[in-house]
Image: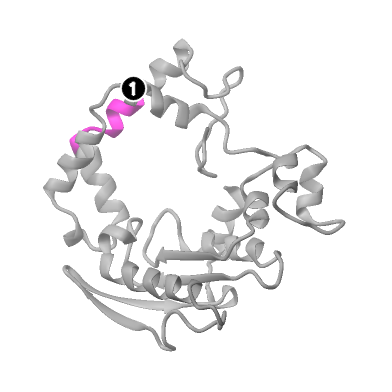
Amino acid sequence: LNATPFWGLNLPGWSGHLPAPALAKRTGRFLFDRIRDYNTIREYLKACYGNAAAFDEQLVQDIRACTNGPGGHAAFASILWSPPVKVSLPDLQEDAEWSKGSALETAAASEQADFEACLQALQCDVLLAFGGADPWCKPAFAKRMLQRLSRRRLELQQRYVELSGVGHCPNHEAPKAVAQVLTAWLQQRGDEAGEVTSLVPAGGVVVEEEWGKTVMTERAESEIEVTWADRLATNFL
């Protein structure tokens, strides 16, 4: 149920399937009401956006409106308490190949694979676009994801584009930059010749958004700088 690698408290005795047991339901309802409070939403947006001008009171109202439907408390309880995603290895074996001694083969011994093993099993090209100022999913996480993706077959691509000054919601905070990156990526996917070219010219490209400028830069995994705190956070999660 829980597709995110960072949520999931794995409440003993509950798989996350609804209906929720009493304890999970009550706790989920209490926390859900705190998180969807107007002031809490504003504080979250202030914390996760690189540019505060990119959101307004209308966005706060829209986010709150999304939580007013039936079943929101129960869905939040499931996300909060259910275990992070685990995919059975027989399912992965149908879609991926791995060599003896690899991480995937090690995962096979437990008959289930975690988030990173699932990444390594992807049999398609992958584009990662991260906000350089994202306080939660920092570029350090992209670096770790690229490391796992690079263990796949050589003909599969993994590309990373970083948007300077952009926070946790690049598609909203820098929609023009995101659209340019996606357009370049999709055009390459449609190139029958299969020629691999840069998604962003060397040195980066400045994009003028409604509320400020951002610089798009394509980086290799080795070019992503991480601090000791970043390493600690990525290892912990």
Q: Is residue 63 magenta?
A: no
The quarter holding residue 158 reads: bottom right
Relative depth, front residue between 25 and 89: 89
* Three-letter amino acid code at the position of disc 1: Gly
Q: Residue at x 39, y 22 (%)?
A: 74
Residue at label 1? 71
From the viewer's perspective, tell me whether residue 58 is left or right of residue 5.
left
Kindly report the secondary structure that dominates the magenta region of the rendered protein.
Answer: helix
x and y, in percent, of residue 149 in the image = 63, 63
Q: Residue at x 83, y 41 (%)?
A: 109
Q: Residue at x 17, y 68 (%)?
A: 211
Q: How is the image coloured?
A: one colour
Q: Residue at x 27, y 58 (%)?
A: 172
x and y, in percent, of residue 61 in the image = 15, 40
Disc 1: CA contacts within 10 A as few (<14), some (14-19) or many (>=20): few
Q: Over which residues does the magenta segment extend? A: 30-38
From the viewer's perspective, tell me whether residue 184 is left or right of residue 98.
left
Relative depth, front residue between 199 and 75: 199
x and y, in percent, of residue 75 in the image = 40, 27
Q: Is residue 163 visible?
A: no
> Does 216 appear above or below 35?
below
